[in-house]
Structures are given as C-alpha cells and as structure tokens.
Image (tube, rainbow, N blue to C red):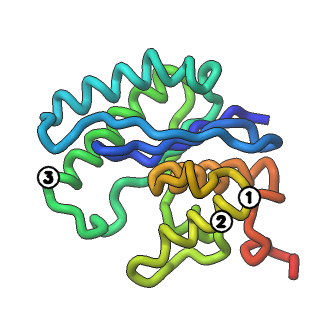
Amino acid sequence: MSLILALDLSKSSTGFAYGRPDDAPRSGSVRFGTPHHTEADVGAKALVWLTKEMPVIVGGIPDVVAIEAAWEGNGGNSAHTSALLLGLQFMVQGVALLKTGRQPRLIKVASARKIFTGKGMYGKGEAKPAVQARCLELGWLGHDTMQPDRADALCIWAAVASEQNPDLKHPSSRKGRA
C-alpha cells in the first residue's frame, strides 16, 4: 500500500495527514506564517518544511501527495488570500513532483467530503463540524487534539486512501452497499 501525504494548505495552519491505507493515519499541523509575515516568508518556511522536515515527520518520501484544491469559487477568500493559497499550491505541487517523481493530486474538497462523511455539499458552517465528527468517530482525533485544518487533511487523506482500502469510505458513500 502506498504512503500517502495529504495537505490542507494555509498560511496560518496547514494541516497534514499521512500513512498507508491499511493503518490509521497520523496527522498534525504546521504554521507557515502569521498576518505579519510576507508571502516570501510564508513560501520560504513552506519550502523548508517540505524539503527538510516533512520527510522526517512522514518517515520518508510519500508515494502520493494529495492537496486540497485551493480554488473552488474562492470560498469567500479575499483576492490576497486566494493568491497566496494558489501560490502555495503551485509551489507544493512543484516540490512534490521533484521529491516523488510523480504528479501530485489536487482533490476537490466536496468530493473528499462525500467519500469521508457521505455528503459532499453542506450548508454554511456545517462542513467542518461534519468532518471533525467523522474524525472523532474513527478515533483519528480526540476532543483534545481536534484542529480544523488537521481534520480537513485527514478527510483528503481518507478520500485518496479509500482507492486502496474501500473500508475507509463512509458507509453512505459506498456504491452497491446499503
């Protein structure tokens, strides 16, 4: 089974999840910057994390890098935030390709949620709690370790990992099952 690294990119808190589909994933988050940091500061910290720290945390070079797609109608982000997220996504894709020799995968969040929670589209303010509830249900995060970006990365990880381990799909999203 492939070693999968999933990322929910953000300046303030990038969530990451990693592991093989036949085992419970591990997760965490990393801060690339604060409102006081420039885009160059954020990019530099992201590059250091991706090239030096991430391989140590993950235990090697992942076989698959999956990134939550940064652009789905901009999600109410400002133009500045959208540009930063797209820039981070572009940079991470390049580093992932160089490190793994494989194209990284951009995952639409609604598609990942459909697989992970059984429902892709949610009303305002409902999606993150649903993803977090599923993480709690699976025992991947506890109330004391819950962090939204971490949970979102676990959702992306599960969507990709379910291709190798269908048991990771939410029961209501499984085709051919009741």
Residue 114 position within the rendered picture, expressed as x and y whole percent measured from the top left: 61, 71
Residue 47 position within the rendered picture, expressed as x and y whole percent measured from the top left: 34, 23
Please rate how many residues cluster around mark 3, counting C-alpha atoms within 10 Å: few if below 14, some from 14 to 19, many from 20. few
The residue that label 1 is drawn on is: 138
Query: What amino acid does circle 2 point to?
Result: Arg
> Dot 2 lies on which element?
helix
Q: Determine whether label 1 and label 2 are within 8 Å by CB.
A: yes
Q: Kindly identify which numbered label has been placed on residue 80.
A: 3
What's the CA distance linking mark 3 and mark 2?
A: 32 Å
Query: What amino acid does circle 1 point to?
Result: Leu
Q: Nearer the viewer, mark 1 or mark 3?
A: 1
User: Tag 2 or tag 3, which sits nearer the N-term?
Assistant: 3
Q: Quadrant of the N terminus?
A: top right
Q: Determine whether label 1 and label 3 are within 8 Å by CB.
A: no
Looking at the picture, does residue 61 appear above or below residue 23? above
Q: Kindly identify which numbered label has been placed on residue 134.
A: 2
What's the CA distance linking mark 1 and mark 2?
A: 6 Å
> Dot 1 lies on which element?
helix
What's the CA distance linking mark 1 and mark 3?
A: 36 Å
Query: What amino acid does circle 3 point to?
Result: His
